[in-house]
Image (tube, grey):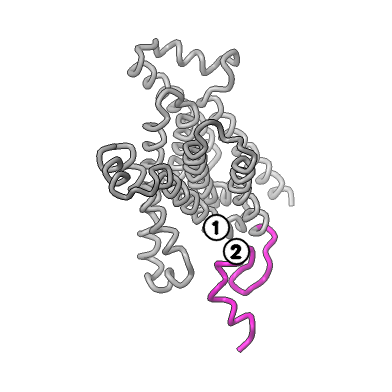
């Protein structure tokens, strides 16, 4: 038996290689980028640069990166189709597993912040809606990570495996809900993430409406960008109106002004427009060949 065949069962330990044991530069680069937040947090810990409550900051940061990577894993399919770069699918599983790992660290640090007192932690989680929501999302992510191996795909069968992994479309809104509830006063980033999630889920919905072709038609992409940004702005205005009675029209106007910095709705519009323009550029280049 060859050494390559022996090493395949442990291929998850070397994620920068493909199923045949070959080195894949794209996977190596993405793996390194996924490690950067953890290394950055370790550096800040060593430098005592986490503020007066270091564990609380670590809990916040690991949860934040878990959700960012969850959104990034959902972005692989739209980007792969729009930019005509099929090799992106090679890193989707890796990004999804990274989201679950950072989420597990988030839970472990929360447990450590309670001195590993299991009974106290369980009571606090059981009496807090936002903690229960976050725990449900994390358990789902861990299940998806545990079933993401090639062996589990074969064991479950392709269709059952796909049906199981579609629960990510439920887990992402749950994780976002948890993020919103724990953010309290500063909801800028959760609002931005909500807008990006709207775009990601909206793309998939429109692809069901327009299933033909390599990607979503241009009018659909433009409508998706404008619609996601408009809903983000409207959602932010509604939130502040319900929370503090702030005039919703004033909040909408703030989104269109740079005096208050880049607001979430405008950031969503710029991101979606940027991807659409990049996709148009790729299509034009391919058409000229």
- The span from disc 2 to disc 1 (Cα, nearest Å) is 7 Å
| Residue 199 marker | none
Residue 149 position within the rendered picture, expressed as x and y whole percent measured from the top left: 47, 67
Can residue 114 be spotted in the picture?
Answer: yes
Quadrant location, the N terminus:
bottom right
Q: Is residue 198 left or right of residue 42?
A: left
Whether residue 76 appears in magenta in the rendering, the answer is no
Q: Circle 1 — which element?
A: helix
User: Which of the pair 190/169 is nearer the observer?
Assistant: 190
| Residue 15 marker | 2
Q: Is residue 39 above or below residue 90?
A: above
Residue at image coords 37%, 36%: 177
Provide the residue designation for mark 1. Answer: 94
Residue 134 position within the rendered picture, expressed as x and y whole percent measured from the top left: 36, 43
Residue at image coords 44%, 40%: 202
Whether residue 5 appears in magenta in the rendering, the answer is yes
| Segment tinted magenta in the rendering | 1-26
User: Which of the pair 80/266 is nearer the observer?
Assistant: 266
Q: Give the crowd class for mark 1: few <14, some 14-19, many >=20 residues within 10 Å.
A: many
């Amino acid at each position: 038996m060859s050494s390559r065949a022996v090493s395949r069962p442990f291929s998850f330990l070397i994620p920068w290689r493909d199923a045949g044991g070959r080195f894949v530069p794209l996977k190596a680069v993405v793996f390194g980028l996924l490690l950067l937040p953890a290394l950055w947090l370790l550096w800040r810990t060593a430098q005592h640069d986490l503020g007066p409550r270091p564990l609380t900051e670590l809990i916040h940061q690991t949860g934040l990166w878990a959700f960012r990577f969850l959104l990034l894993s959902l972005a692989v399919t739209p980007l792969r189709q729009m930019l005509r770069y099929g090799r992106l699918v090679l890193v989707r599983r890796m990004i999804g597993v990274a989201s679950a790992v950072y989420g597990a660290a988030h839970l472990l640090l929360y447990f450590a912040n309670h001195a590993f007192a299991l009974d106290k932690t369980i009571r606090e989680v059981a009496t807090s809606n936002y903690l229960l929501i976050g725990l449900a999302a994390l358990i789902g992510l861990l299940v998806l990570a545990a079933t993401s191996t090639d062996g589990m795909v074969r064991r479950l069968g392709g269709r059952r495996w796909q049906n199981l992994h579609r629960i990510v479309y439920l887990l992402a809104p749950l994780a976002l809900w948890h993020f919103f509830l724990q953010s309290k006063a500063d909801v800028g980033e959760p609002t931005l993430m909500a807008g990006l999630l709207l775009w990601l889920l909206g793309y998939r919905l429109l692809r069901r409406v327009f299933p033909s072709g390599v990607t979503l038609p241009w009018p659909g992409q433009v409508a998706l960008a404008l619609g996601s940004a408009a809903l983000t702005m409207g959602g932010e205005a509604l939130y502040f109106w319900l929370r503090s009675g702030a005039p919703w029209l004033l909040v909408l106007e703030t989104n269109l002004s740079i005096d208050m910095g880049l607001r979430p709705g405008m950031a969503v519009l710029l991101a979606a427009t940027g991807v659409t323009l990049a996709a148009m550029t790729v299509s034009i280049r391919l058409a000229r060949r």
